DNA sequence: CTGAATCCTTGGAGATACTG
DNA sequence: CAGTATCTCCAAGGATTCAG
């Protein structure tokens, strides 16, 4: 956690959006809320994200202490991602986002595409 | 609310982020949570945003039905922004963001810069 | 399978100046 | 006061390829 960066924020909301506001970050956290996931499981859940973007977002989330990366030195490679304790504190936010989105779908008369 | 746009989402979280995830949108909604505000009040609350950016974000929020723009044809001009009913439904999200941000500041040992 | 490296494009975003 | 217009530029993001 970079102190200078923190001092630059004018408002708590800004700090939160900086951590979770990345293009696919909320979706990644949402996916990990249901447990540890492997790379390709996240990729499948966020098909819009190219490998490059997914890597980048995952790395940033890791640097912000939101997720853990667990690499297994096996063949074929296996990497598991999970929420850290800090990441768990984001759950209420993503929960609120999800609830709001569901309401949005209902208003539009479109079935909610929750994976599953 | 654009049906085609809605159908393009893979997940409710995505829809919510599309509405609130803009660079200054959460901050704007946060500002309007405490009541109707004039343009320059919002600008003061979000000093990072240039007039151009602020206009754009406000217009997008208006198009998404999140805020109301009330223009008074007086001299000097006066425009007031407020949350719509839909905008009110975003309050739990922004609240969650704010709470998380405050926690973040505490962890960093930096005083929370809530305006006031 | 899980990425990293490379190249390339687009539009997001700042600075500045101007108008109803 | 509350924005728009114009110009500019950099970095976010995509496509593709390659590697451990």
Image: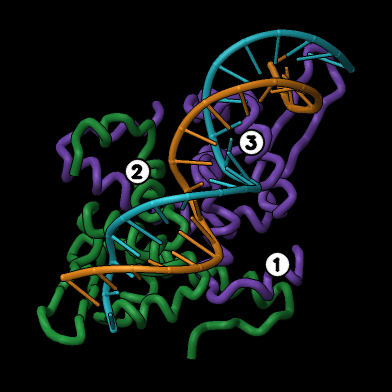
Chain colours: A purple, B green, C orange, D cyan
| Residues at marks 3 and 1 on the same chain | yes
Against B86, is A62 above or below? above
Element class at badge 1? helix
Disc 3 crowd, CA 10 A, few/some/many (<14, 14-19, 20+): some
**Residue plotted at (44% across, 79% down):** B45
Relative to D5, is A79 above or below? above
Q: Classify residue B108 by image quadrant.
A: bottom right
Dot 3: chain letter? A
| Nearest-to-viewer mark from 3 and 2 | 2
- Residue drawn at x 72%, y 46% is A62
Location of mark 2 (residue): B15
| Image quarter of the N terminus of chain A | bottom right
Tell me the crowding category of disc 1: few under 14, some 14 to 19, or many 20 or more residues within 10 angstroms, Cα based. few
Q: Label 2 near label 3: C-beta < 8 Å?
A: no
Which percent across, then down, holds residue B61? Answer: 28, 58
Q: Nearer the viewer, residue B108 or A21?
A: A21
């Amino acid at each position: 956690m970079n102190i200078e960066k923190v001092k630059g924020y004018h408002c708590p909301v800004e700090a939160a959006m900086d951590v979770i506001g990345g293009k696919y970050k909320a979706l990644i956290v949402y996916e990990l809320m249901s447990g540890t996931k492997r790379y390709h499981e996240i990729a499948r859940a966020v098909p819009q994200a190219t490998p490059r973007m997914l890597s980048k977002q995952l790395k940033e989330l890791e640097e912000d202490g939101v997720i853990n990366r667990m690499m297994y030195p096996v063949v074929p490679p296996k990497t598991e991602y999970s929420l850290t304790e800090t990441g768990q504190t984001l759950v209420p936010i993503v929960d609120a986002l999800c609830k709001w989105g569901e309401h949005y779908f209902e208003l539009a008369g479109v079935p909610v595409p929750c994976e599953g």
